[in-house]
Amino acid sequence: MKTLPSLTRLLWIAASVSLFGLAACVEDDDGLGTEPDRDIAFLGYSDPDTRQTTCGNCHISKQRSWQRTGHAGAWADLQASGQAQSSCNRCHTTNGSSNLAPDTAGFFSVSAGGQRFYYDVQCESCHGPGAQHVTAPDESQPLSTMKAAVGLEIGCGTCHTGTHTPFVEEWQESGHGTALATPASRAECAGCHEGRTVLARFDPDSRFLEQNESTLYGITCAVCHDPHGTRNNAELRYPIDTPDIETNLCMQCHQKRSNPDPTTSRGAHSPQGPMLLGTAGWRPSTFTYDTSLILSSHGSALNPRLCAGCHVDAFTVNDAATGNFVFHSTGHRFRAIPCVDAQGVPTTSDDCAVSSRTFRACATSGCHATQAVARGAFQVLDTRLTSYLDVLWKDNNGNRVRDAGDTGLLMQVPASEFTVNATITVAEGALFNTTMISSTLAASNDGSHGVHNPFYAEALLLASISEMRTRYGLTVPPALAGRVAARRAALGMDP
Ligand code: HEC
Ligand code: HEC
Ligand code: HEC
Ligand code: HEC
Ligand code: HEC
Ligand code: HEC
Ligand code: HEC
Ligand code: HEC
């Protein structure tokens, strides 16, 4: 709730308090003729038939949007599954298992007649019991938690867990699951690197338990998902299908530095968004390119979920022989081509051979005929880009510093070409493109081996090579020069 007009607020408080206060004497038409038993701490629904939560009588807009979420249908879906049993109720009703109350409260503390007041994942599933709050509403209680995984005691992770829904387990293994201490604790970095700070950026009105703690949080569930509902799929705070840096969820953060900055010698920093959109990198004034290739196929309508189309891919692994369920991946490790074991279950390693990775996201999307085709395309692209990168800078001792023993065009220009001043020289621009696209030459890079925008990545490197040759009068082996010319023509670049 942002701010209710004060009169309305008072009226609602009066209405709700009297409603709650009188509840004990009102005849309820549940057919039993007596008022069903209610928990003393959890309020639950004030009207189970319309899914009107007691909290929502005052917090009207939260009620309206929550009612459209999957949480409001959790009980009905459980019954419809035909598999309902008592072990399921913990996560499909309102009780104390996901908040700071004892888990025997709420749904579990009332007789059968009262249980329908506690169906579904209501406000108090996350916020905890609210009886005290409604008698004296103030800003302090009952606050929810944005913790997902800490001890698995409270928060989203208590339900979104286990073999069938291991969101929290997979998320914990992802980069989003932990905060890198240095950037998370620095004010100028925390807006992308620390959960509480990001939440305040995405929703300045947000209020939660950890708000004033000094602990650093990663990018937790509630940073990306608004538990009260949004108009986006999966209650995401921003859409994932807009090819637009301003509105796309992932691009709220994956876009720090994607063009050379005259005030620093630093290279790219999380340039994935602009790479996908074809705006990243140094483009020399002579840069020409077939603009129909700019969004490539990966950033176009052919891949409507954009980043998530490759990086948030949920799938189930069944045993090849028996067909029995083995594992469900929620896609919340955010890996596009995760390492998998012989059965196809993702492993925690991120460092395996291309042949041990699944390319299923590329094939199930319908974009590539089979996983093998996608894997082949990945290898061809990687080999091609590596050959250009080696021409620009081959870091022979692998120390990420341009030093004696390294080879390439960037080694053949004077150090004065790399001075930080208002001018971006050809060498600086070419260096920026090289370290952005290479997955090894700098700590921070695009990291996709060119996949985020294959043709565009290639065009940036080809332009860098050509400009280095003309600007500094450098030569490359004739065989390579021929290949560069052919690829430039293929990409619609001027000869
Ligand atoms: C009788 C009306 C009423 C009911 C019922 C009610 N609240 Fe509130 N709630 C308020 C008022 C008034 C505030 C103070 C808001 C303010 O000053 O901005 C408040 C504040 C809050 C806050 C603090 C956040 C903020 O904006 O300051 C949370 C969280 C909250 N309520 C959750 C709940 C939950 C969960 C329930 C159900 C258990 C609930 N409320 C039921 C009236 C109510
Ligand atoms: C540990 C908590 C937990 C338990 C216990 C649990 N569920 Fe769920 N269930 C969830 C979560 C979380 C989801 C949402 C998962 C998602 O969106 O991928 C879910 C989703 C579902 C859905 C799908 C709803 C839909 O249509 O999208 C069904 C059906 C379901 N559960 C049935 C059951 C049954 C039957 C049991 C008991 C045998 C059970 N659940 C026990 C947490 C739980
Ligand atoms: C609130 C900012 C933010 C948002 C929104 C965000 N990310 Fe991230 N992402 C990060 C940060 C920060 C890291 C680096 C974390 C680290 O290394 O500790 C990261 C790391 C990653 C990684 C590296 C893999 C890993 O596990 O280390 C991938 C892939 C990724 N994000 C994909 C996505 C996708 C896809 C989306 C949208 C669905 C997204 N991110 C949304 C901030 C964000
Ligand atoms: C799935 C868990 C969950 C459910 C269900 C839920 N909330 Fe929340 N609520 C949170 C979290 C987490 C926050 C803090 C982060 C945020 O703002 O989303 C929060 C914040 C709030 C706030 C503080 C203002 C704000 O926007 O941060 C209010 C008020 C509130 N919730 C009321 C409600 C009401 C009323 C309902 C039921 C109609 C409800 N919540 C259902 C988890 C939940
Ligand atoms: C970096 C952003 C991000 C974070 C952090 C994140 N999610 Fe998601 N989540 C997504 C995206 C993107 C989707 C896919 C939405 C789509 O396909 O439209 C998704 C989908 C889901 C779904 C729906 C899956 C289905 O079956 O439809 C659930 C449930 C979910 N997330 C729960 C969680 C939980 C629980 C956490 C914390 C442990 C979490 N998410 C953390 C981005 C995020
Ligand atoms: C009490 C258990 C419980 C808690 C706590 C809980 N969830 Fe859920 N969640 C469920 C169940 C059960 C479903 C499946 C509902 C259905 O579709 O039937 C679900 C579904 C979802 C979905 C997919 C449905 C939709 O509306 O798009 C998202 C996203 C989601 N939860 C996010 C969260 C986040 C974020 C939190 C923490 C702020 C959270 N959940 C806390 C049990 C829980
Ligand atoms: C066409 C599929 C595809 C799309 C779309 C895509 N990526 Fe990637 N991304 C990849 C592949 C493949 C890799 C290389 C993964 C590897 O080497 O393990 C990768 C690597 C990354 C990495 C480096 C860390 C890692 O996982 O190895 C980050 C961060 C990342 N992508 C974020 C994003 C973001 C943010 C978006 C949207 C702006 C996005 N990606 C769009 C396929 C894609
Ligand atoms: C606009 C959002 C944003 C800001 C601001 C930001 N970062 Fe990042 N940073 C990211 C994202 C997203 C990733 C993960 C993607 C990747 O690794 O390419 C990341 C990755 C990192 C990494 C891990 C990868 C690497 O380079 O080794 C470090 C370290 C880092 N950032 C440090 C910082 C520091 C220090 C600051 C502040 C001076 C900062 N970041 C500011 C978005 C941001």
Image (spheres, grey):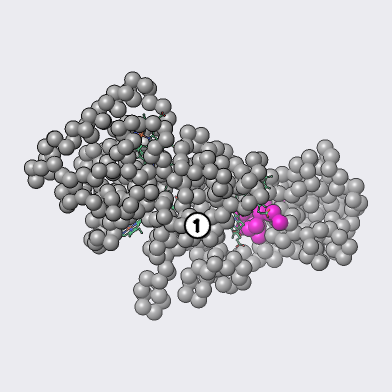
* Nearest to the observer: residue 357 or residue 459: 357
Which residue corresponds to the image point at 12% horizontal and 43% vertical from the top-left?
30
**454 in the magenta segment:** yes
**479 in the magenta segment:** no
CB of mark 1 near ligand 5 (< 8 Å): yes
Most frequent secondary structure within the magenta stretch: loop
- Quadrant for the N terminus, please: top left
> Percent position (x, y) of residue 359?
53, 65
Up-down: is 266 above or below 64?
below
Residue 89 lies in quadrant: bottom left
Residue 434 lies in quadrant: bottom right
Disc 1 residue type? Trp
* Nearest to the observer: residue 83 or residue 477: 83
* Nearest to the observer: residue 213 or residue 323: 213
The answer to whether residue 373 is visible is no
Which residue corresponds to the image point at 46% horizontal and 37% vertical from the top-left?
207
Mark 1 burial class by Cα count in 10 Å: few <14, some 14-19, many 20+: many
Which residue corresponds to the image point at 75% horizontal and 64% vertical from the top-left?
387
Viewed as shown, does residue 292 lie left or right of 152? right
Residue 443 lies in quadrant: bottom right
Residue pointed to by mark 1 = 171
Viewed as shown, does residue 223 lie left or right of 485? left
Which residue corresponds to the image point at 47% horizontal and 49% vertical from the top-left?
147
